[in-house]
Amino acid sequence: MTARSLWEIERPSHVPQSRPAPGSAYDDVVLGGGVVGLSVATELAHRGRRVTVVEARPVIGGGTSGRSTGKLSLLQGTRLSTIERHHGSSAAAAYVQTCQEALAWIEQVLERWDVPFQRRPAVSWAAHEREIKATRAEDAAARRAGLATRWQRAVPGGLPGYGAVVLEDQLQVDPLAYTAALAQEAVDAGVDVQVGRRARSVGGGEHPVVALDDGTELTAEQVVVATGLPVLDRSAAFATTKPHRSYIVAFESDQELEPMAVSVGSPSWTVRGATDADGRPLVLVGGHGHAVGRSMPAGRHVEALRGWAGEHLDVGREVAAWSAQDYQTPDEVPIVGRTRGSSRVHVITGFGGWGLVAGVGAARRLARAVAEGDEVPVVPPRRLLGARAAAAVLGWNSEVGAHMTSGWLGALGRAPVTPGETQGVVTRGRPPVATSVVDGCTRSVSAVCPHLGGIVRWNDVEGSWDCPLHGSRFEADGRLIEGPATRGLAPVRPDADESTT
């Protein structure tokens, strides 16, 4: 599996950056340089506010935004029928309106910065007969929400299945180029973009202080946390979302696939066409996702994608394989609002794989509310107290508790051992020790996630330690990759004294 996505292989990411002096004061500090954070920042800057974006990665687009499949669609799996089931047709219509406004603005940004995009039919299809009902329900909900969808028996693109919902005239794009265009838009609006700087904490009060990992402190009137899963425990967003990891494989093909399609069942499949730098057609096959850290070995999911593509599509040589992470809510509605205890710190998350459009829409609405001083709901929102959503959240947190217990019991009961090449193992110690061997290099780090104390598990596909509680991920050497954790795994001796355990 390649460490870089197809988009990163095809083009490097470069964005004008700034590095303000320590103690810099802003109207707004936005944490997270993906499409959501950049959209919040741009909208705030257009309203005359001094804004900075702080991105932990060394480049813009290195996270989920730049590693997605690049589908910009108002038809999003079975999202509308799910929202309607939980909250009624008016809520689904409001969601569509937000996404329509976002998509219109996105198209303007792409054209302004000369980012190529293609118009394609979006498809939600039934890969199995039992999924026909779900596609019919999505078609009905979409039409009630004002979309000109249609249901048809034949699945576009010759995909194997039993029927599909189709919405014409949606967009597909290189998501890394799209994210870079949003960054250029932000810089053009006057936003300071800072990369390679990670937030450690955010204080409350009238002027929140953002403490960065290099000791710098930034002062703001308002802070927006748009980091996938917020790096703020007081928001409790981690308790009402589920971190989800999925995979994408790109293949050479004799002809480009026309539709952008997502199957509605589980496991799910997502496909789209693309071209390489020389204009040769490619097919992208993704999906087969799972809760982060909970379905190991992860390699079997990638093999499932390869097997499905070889069986059902005309694919040739594999050119790239990668993964991305998103965060799901039980009712498919994003979580957007202010944290408890502070009217000046806001979080935005939970787009379930559709943040390239829905995230932009929610971000722009939040920015307008922040700039105009409108009332912003508290996170977690009251809607998650409804019977269906509350039951799902309760189930998710029961799973978290089970993984916490099983992780510690497993670690404390396993004697130290050196794993094989590209393998990792957690053994007893104080703290429990996570030992891996990658390219002949043996590394040992604490197996305890610094977020809430879960025991990490080895991801054999990506060579990372993943926490099954709330999705924090770490390099083999312990460096933090992503998640609600704000620090990495501390290095430890592989022969830690067992007598102290």
Image: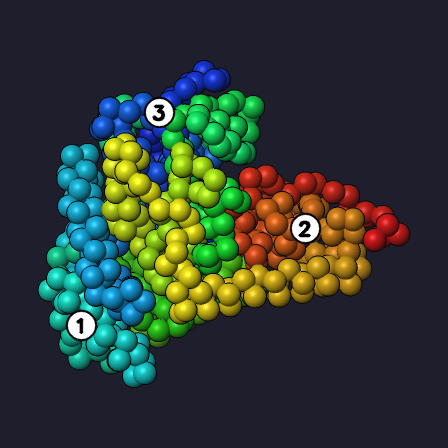
Towards the viewer: 119 or 194: 194
Real-space CA distance between mark 2 and mark 1, rounded to the nearest whole angstrom: 48 Å
- Residue topped by disc 2: 447
Q: Residue furthest top?
A: 21
Q: Amino acid under label 2?
A: Ala
Query: Residue at (59%, 46%) from the top-left corner?
Result: 451
Residue 4 lies, with reference to residue 158, above or below; the image says above
Position in image of residue 274 (x %, y %): 25, 54
Position in image of residue 2 (x %, y %): 46, 51
Q: Residues within 10 Å of mark 3 (few under 14, many from 20)?
A: some
Q: Residues within 10 Å of mark 2 (few under 14, many from 20)?
A: many
Position in image of residue 342 (x %, y %): 45, 37
Real-space CA distance between mark 3 and mark 2, rounded to the nearest whole angstrom: 39 Å
Secondary structure at badge 3 equals: strand
Query: Residue at (54%, 49%) from the top-left corner?
Result: 472
Instruction: Confirm whether residue 336 shows in the render.
Output: yes
Q: Amino acid under label 3?
A: Asp
- Residue topped by disc 3: 27
Secondary structure at badge 1 equals: helix
Query: Which of the two labelled residues, at mark 2 and mark 1, occupies the earlier sequence position?
Result: 1
Q: Quadrant of residue 214?
A: top right
